[in-house]
Image: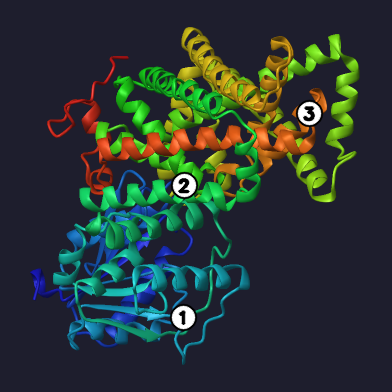
């Protein structure tokens, strides 16, 4: 038995509960007195950085009744954080908590307490989804709740039906065994405690309860998606991926990624059309195009180095070129350019760059790419309007699908629409970033707080603020902005030069100015078009946009233009895959390092465990 004979500690997590907390405490005391010996229990009001009169009421109740204690926090800890702190301070061997709105019928309190106190269970939890319960669950919360529990059961291997019912008890030994491993301090705390208890082999019981909803019943984007969803993914990684991630599996995954990327090039391209196109092209000039394109990759590494330098990290061009190769190879396999996330963990694993900074640097790079090709396409279009207005009329007719088959017409129209929308959004994004970077106002936190008043707000807002701040730092430095923009222009010029060599490989011996103009326009619009989420690598929509422009502005048939587009795209993808394979073998990034590496902020401050290659730049 614990100090002063206290066996059971009931913790009531409270945030701004001035209207109800006194009634909840008195109801709890009466319910406990009905089945426990006098002085064998306590009720702890764990007020979590309240802004109303809850602290004063809790202090008064504690002064009036020695069975009541007040646990105060000056700042918002989140539900899990408040429970952790209050349970550690509690005196009982059986630790209980339930929501202060008393949504769960209090007649179940004895079963909850005695499951741990006298029946020997390590953890007990009520369930709103077991047979025999009466739970009035609104549809707008019932459906998300069922989906959440299904995800936890399927992805995390739990055998329980309801993980979020606010009606739980732990033995002190079980709590102390689990608490140091539980990372979430907000609403996912309950779920993580239950899942880890089962994985540890502790005795867990779940029983049906009668439950009536009170208070909040709305879907909260910050809590339910960014908060709970991200925590499920974190646990999936920790439980199911991290234990098996090592250098050997990393090399195997890298090899499979490269082979898959290469195979997909021929899944999404008509092999017969490709063979026909290659047979009509000069192999020497096609190979020359591949060599020229290869030269753009160190420049990509140089640009990425400059972006990271603005964010406080100075790395070698060679390493960053490899990281870019790997992420671009991933983009050939994973739709919607989600392969970019691979680069974030590469620079985190090998150089300690925080994930927020890694994704911010990718956002900056992507914005510069889109802005550059938008400006290039727009520049050529303006030149055509001035010097060859009939060409613009022909382009408009082609964009409408005039003279093309049904399938070709649909592909071309889709490409034109997507390219136009993406171009406008790219320009708008740059303007917004530059303007906001020169403003002292911070709208991130106010926007996040407007969407939610949940305890996850601080956590989500801090991450988003850091991400936005990193993006703005690059935009605020005019010299860096211009330098990175110039590098981007050079990268895309080399991309166009590769396409021009493919033009020549097909025997299109036309005046160089004409080829340059068409090449810049076709490559720019094709790449804008393939930004749309679709097949890995965007193969198909790029060819449609490219071929439509080439066949309209040059004396080339649509079929030949498609052949040029296919060879141009395949050449670039082969270089990408080859570079990605070599980079994955040479860097051999371990997924374990990415997840379990030292904290990024400590690395930046010179932590002894930081990789030797990391060289933070002084602000």
Marks 1 and 3 sit apart, C-alpha to C-alpha, by: 68 Å
Marks 3 and 2 sit apart, C-alpha to C-alpha, by: 31 Å
Asked if residue 544 can be seen in this view, the reply is yes
Residue drawn 41% across and 64% down? 21
At numbered mark 2, what does the secondary structure look like: helix, strand or loop?
helix
Q: Residues within 10 Å of mark 2 (few under 14, many from 20)?
A: many
Residue 342 lies left or right of residue 335; in this view the side is left
Percent of width and height locating residue 281? 62, 31
At numbered mark 1, what does the secondary structure look like: helix, strand or loop?
loop
**Residue 556 marker:** 3
**Residue 261 marker:** 2
Percent of width and height locating residue 60? 32, 58
At numbered mark 3, what does the secondary structure look like: helix, strand or loop?
loop
Coloration mode? rainbow
List the single residue furthest toward the top: 479
Residue on which disc 1 sits = 128
Residue drawn 40% across and 46% down? 258
Does residue 61 lie above or below 198 as drawn? above
């Amino acid at each position: 038995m614990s100090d002063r004979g206290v066996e059971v500690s009931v913790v009531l997590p409270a945030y701004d509960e001035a209207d109800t907390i006194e009634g909840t405490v008195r109801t709890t005391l009466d319910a406990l007195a009905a089945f426990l010996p006098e002085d064998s229990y306590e009720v702890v009001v764990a007020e979590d950085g309240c802004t109303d009169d809850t602290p004063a009421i809790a202090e008064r109740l504690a002064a009036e009744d020695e069975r009541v204690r007040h646990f105060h926090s000056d700042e918002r800890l989140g539900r899990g954080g408040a429970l952790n702190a209050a349970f550690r301070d509690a005196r009982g061997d059986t630790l209980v908590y339930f929501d202060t709105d008393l949504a769960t019928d209090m007649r179940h309190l004895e079963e909850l307490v005695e499951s741990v106190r006298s029946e020997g269970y390590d953890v007990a939890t009520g369930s709103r989804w077991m047979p025999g319960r009466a739970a009035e669950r609104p549809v707008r919360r019932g459906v998300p709740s069922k989906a959440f529990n299904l995800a936890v059961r399927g992805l995390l291997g739990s055998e329980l039906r309801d993980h979020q019912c606010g009606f739980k008890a732990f033995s002190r030994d079980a709590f102390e065994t689990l608490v140091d491993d539980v990372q979430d301090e907000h609403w996912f705390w309950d779920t993580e405690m239950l899942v880890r208890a089962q994985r540890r082999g502790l005795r867990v019981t779940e029983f049906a309860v009668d439950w009536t909803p009170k208070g909040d019943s709305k879907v909260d984007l910050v809590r339910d998606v960014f908060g709970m969803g991200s925590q499920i993914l974190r646990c999936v990684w920790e439980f199911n991926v991290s234990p098996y991630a090592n250098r050997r599996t990393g090399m195997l995954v890298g090899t499979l990624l490269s082979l898959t990327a290469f195979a997909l090039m021929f899944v999404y391209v008509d092999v017969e059309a490709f063979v026909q196109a290659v047979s009509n092209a000069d192999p020497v000039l096609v190979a020359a195009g591949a060599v020229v394109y290869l030269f753009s990759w160190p420049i990509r590494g140089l640009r990425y180095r400059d972006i990271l330098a603005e964010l406080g990290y100075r790395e070698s061009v060679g390493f960053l070129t490899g990281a870019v190769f790997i992420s671009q190879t991933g983009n050939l396999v994973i739709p919607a350019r989600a392969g970019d996330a691979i680069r974030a963990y590469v620079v985190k694993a090998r150089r300690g760059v925080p994930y927020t900074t890694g994704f911010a640097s990718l956002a900056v790079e992507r914005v510069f790419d889109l802005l550059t090709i938008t400006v290039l396409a727009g520049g050529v279009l303006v030149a055509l309007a001035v010097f060859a207005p009939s060409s613009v009329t022909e382009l408009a007719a082609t964009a409408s699908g005039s003279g093309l088959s049904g399938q070709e017409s649909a592909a071309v129209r889709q490409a034109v629409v997507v390219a136009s929308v993406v171009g406008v959004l790219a320009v708008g994004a740059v303007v917004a970033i530059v303007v906001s970077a020169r403003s002292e106002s911070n709208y991130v936190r106010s926007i996040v707080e407007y969407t939610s008043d949940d305890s996850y707000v601080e956590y989500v807002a801090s991450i988003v603020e850091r991400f936005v701040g990193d993006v703005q730092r690059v935009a605020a430095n005019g010299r860096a902005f211009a330098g990175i923009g110039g590098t981007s222009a050079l990268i895309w010029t080399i991309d166009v030069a590769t396409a021009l060599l493919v033009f020549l490989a097909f025997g299109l011996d036309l005046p160089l100015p004409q080829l340059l103009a068409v090449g810049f326009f076709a490559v720019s619009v094709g790449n804008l078009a393939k930004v749309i989420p679709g097949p890995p690598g965007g193969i198909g929509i790029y060819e449609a946009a490219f071929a439509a422009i080439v066949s309209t502005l040059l004396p080339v048939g649509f079929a030949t233009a498609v052949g040029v587009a296919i060879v141009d795209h395949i050449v670039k993808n082969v270089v990408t895959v080859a570079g990605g394979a070599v980079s994955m073998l040479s860097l051999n990034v371990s997924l374990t390092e990415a997840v379990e590496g030292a904290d990024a902020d400590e690395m930046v401050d010179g932590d002894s465990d930081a990789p030797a290659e990391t060289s933070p730049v002084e602000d």
